[in-house]
Amino acid sequence: MANIEIKQLEKTYTDAKGRQTRVLDSIDLTVSGDTFVSIVGPSGSGKTTLLNIVSGIESATSGSVSLREGGRDAKVGYVFQDPRLLPWRTVMQNLSFVQDDRSDWEVRARHYLELVGLGHLGDRFPAQLSGGQQQRIGIARAFSVEPDILLMDEPFSHLDAMTSRSLREHLEQIWLQSRKTVLFVTHDITEAVQLSDRIIVLAPGGRIHETIEVDLPRPRRASDPRVAVLQAEVLARFEALEAAA
C-alpha cells in the first residue's frame, strides 16, 4: 500500500533584499492506499509548491516527506499542467521514452491509451493532436509506468470546460481500474468534488485550513444533485476563506 507522509513541512523564499516569504507553514498530511486526494486553495496558498516538494522538484526549508510502498521507496508518476510531449516522437514513442521497466511496456502503453480513448492514435505526432488529446496522452503516459503514487498539477487548467469535463470522466475511469494513490492539485472546486475522496483546503500562507471528506458513490457526474450540493457547500467555504484573507 503506497503511503505519502508529510511532517511539519515548511518552505520559505528569500528575495535579493533578504526579505522572507513563507509559502508553506507546518504542513502535516498523510495519504495512504487507494485514495484520491485533492489540494485546493486561493492563488498563493502554496498548492504547486507543496506538490513540487513531494515530487522532489523543490526542496523544503524544513520538515520531511516520505513516499513509500511497503518496505521500499514508492515509484512516482507526474502529470503536469501541460502535456510536455516530445514533438519529434510519436505518441507511442513518447510513452516508450519514460519506461524504466521495458518488459511488456507496449502492452501497458496501449492499455492506457485505450482507456483514454486514443488507442488508434499511437502513430501520430503531438502536432497532429488537439490540446485535449495531448493531455490525455500525458495522463496515459503517467499511468503506463505503473506508479505507486501519482502526482497531478492542475492538468486540465488550460482546457475548455467541455474538454475538461470529458477528461475528468476519463481520469476517474482509469483511477477506478488502477486505484493508485493520487495527490491532485486544482483550483477548480468542481474537479475536486467529482474526483476526490478527500479535499485538503490550503489557506493563504500555506497552512491547512480544513479537510473535507467526500463520501459520494462513483462514478460521479456533475448532473448528480448530490455532487452539485457538495460543490456548492465546498465553494461557499472556499469563498469565505478568500473573503477572510
Image: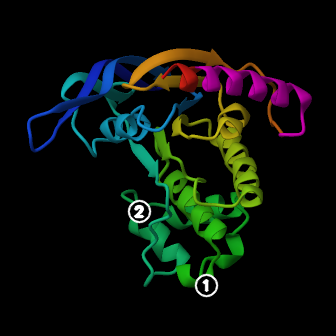
Q: Left or right of 60: which side holds 218?
A: right
Q: Quadrant of residue 103?
A: bottom left
Pick the residue in front: 34 or 71. 34
User: Mark 2: few, some, or many residues within 10 Å (few <14, many ≥20)?
Assistant: few
User: Mark 1: few, some, or many residues within 10 Å (few <14, many ≥20)?
Assistant: few
Who's the residue at 73% across and 64% down the image?
117
Q: Are marks 1 and 2 in contact (CB under 8 Å)?
A: no
- Percent position (x, y) of residue 166? 76, 55
Q: CA distance from mark 1 to mark 2?
A: 27 Å
Pick the residue in front: 97 or 21. 21
Identify which amino acid the numbered label 1 is placed on: Gln
Residue, disc 1: 128
Secondary structure under badge 2?
loop
- Percent position (x, y) of residue 146? 50, 48
Decide: is 89 above or below 107: below
Q: Which residues are magenta?
A: 222-240
Q: Nearer the viewer, mark 1 or mark 2?
A: 1
Decide: is 100 above or below 221: below
- Give the overall secondary structure of the magenta segment: helix
- Percent position (x, y) of residue 233? 74, 21
Residue, disc 2: 102
Secondary structure under badge 1?
helix
Q: Left or right of 63: which side holds 221?
A: right
Identify which amino acid the numbered label 2 is placed on: Arg
* 231 in magenta: yes
Of marks 1 and 2, which one's residue comes earlier in the chain?
2
Pick the residue in front: 27 or 6. 27
Decide: is 88 above or below 172: below
Who's the residue at 49% across and 55% down the image?
81
Residue 200 in view (yes/no): no
